[in-house]
Image: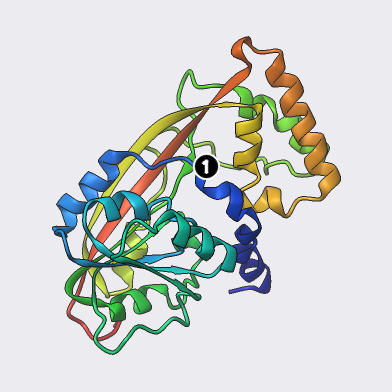
Amino acid sequence: MSDERKRLRTIFNVAADLYQRARPEYPEQLYDALIRITGIAVGDQLLEIGAATGKATTPLARRGFRITCIEIGPDLAVAARTNLAAFPNVTIAENAFETWRPTVTDRFDLVFAATAWHWIDPATRYQRAWELLRPGGHLAFWSATHVFPDGGDPFFVELQDVYDEIGEGLSEDAARPRPGELPDHRGEIERTGLFEDVVVRHFDWEVSYNADEYIRLLDTFSGHIAMEARKRDRLYTEIRRRLVQRPHGRLRRHWGTVLEIARRTERSSAQ
């Protein structure tokens, strides 16, 4: 993993006070599908990679699972402990997934990551997950991603002239996927030789934001956190100016996610 990737994956720590209220909730149907497909039951032991403030932890903790959360950001870990204090079966470990070591007897029924798997070193992430799972256990991951449905809100596309102006524009070939068109990692998972029976499910939803809410959301994205202050100020000023001209002063952001689940093979290592 490059030094820049290592830096960016820890930059979210500065947004610890915003993350829980600004990031979108994942659909309840996603958790229902996760439980149905993996067969996990109340009391099973789960390991979450990159828990942040507990956004995806809470819905599973409410369903009665025992969860160990790994979070690399110290402030995010503190926020997670606060948000999850009502769940005694949830523990937070401040560490990186690549270097974290469980107790000798810890083997997990499910290893999962919500909008965090892509930050884990691709050279080792599948092997580490395999090692931490019990025989027959599952790996699952998903992310919240911007999608562009037909007839969706054009605000983001219209705002690209400002991103271009400040030198933060998208490349000409940047994808603008529609719901159901997000890519998956089925081939990558199968090529490891460590997981099988891959299942892929797509989910889509919409969230309405006023200017303050949308800017808080942007302040939790690595690219906007790392952006020069003068550029960020110009962008946010323009967002406020444009939204105040809209009826009700709101925009709609369209979200999509791909839930990917795979069962651990009984091979000792990838072939």
In this view, the residue in front, 248 or 116, is: 248
Give the left or right position of residue 64, taking residue 259 as reference.
Answer: left
At x 45% / y 62%, what residue is drawn? Answer: 81
Q: Residue at 71% of width from left, 16% of height from top?
A: 244
Quadrant of res 27? top left
**Residue 157, horizontal then vertical, whole percent:** 63, 28
Q: Is residue 66 above or below residue 260?
A: below
Q: Looking at the image, which residue is at 66% across and 27% down?
A: 211
Residue 225: horizontal and vertical position, in percent? 70, 52
* Residue 197 in the figure: left or right of residue 242: left
Residue 145: give x, y in percent of width and height: 48, 43
Q: Residues within 10 Å of mark 1 (few under 14, many from 20)?
A: some
What type is the residue that disc 1 sits on? Arg
Furthest-right residue in this view: 230
Q: Position of residue 125 (x, y in %)?
A: 41, 73
Q: Which residue is mark 1?
A: 21
- Colouring mode (rainbow / by chain / secondary structure / one colour): rainbow
The answer to whether residue 239 is seen in the rendering is: yes
The answer to whether any part of residue 52 appears in the image is no
Quarter of the picture holding the N terminus: bottom right
Q: In the rendered view, would you say 165 is above or below 270?
A: above
**Residue at the image point whose x is 48% and y is 18% from the top:** 151
Instruction: Give SS at disc 1.
Output: helix
Q: Quadrant of the C terminus?
A: bottom left
Say whether residue 218 is left or right of residue 64.
right
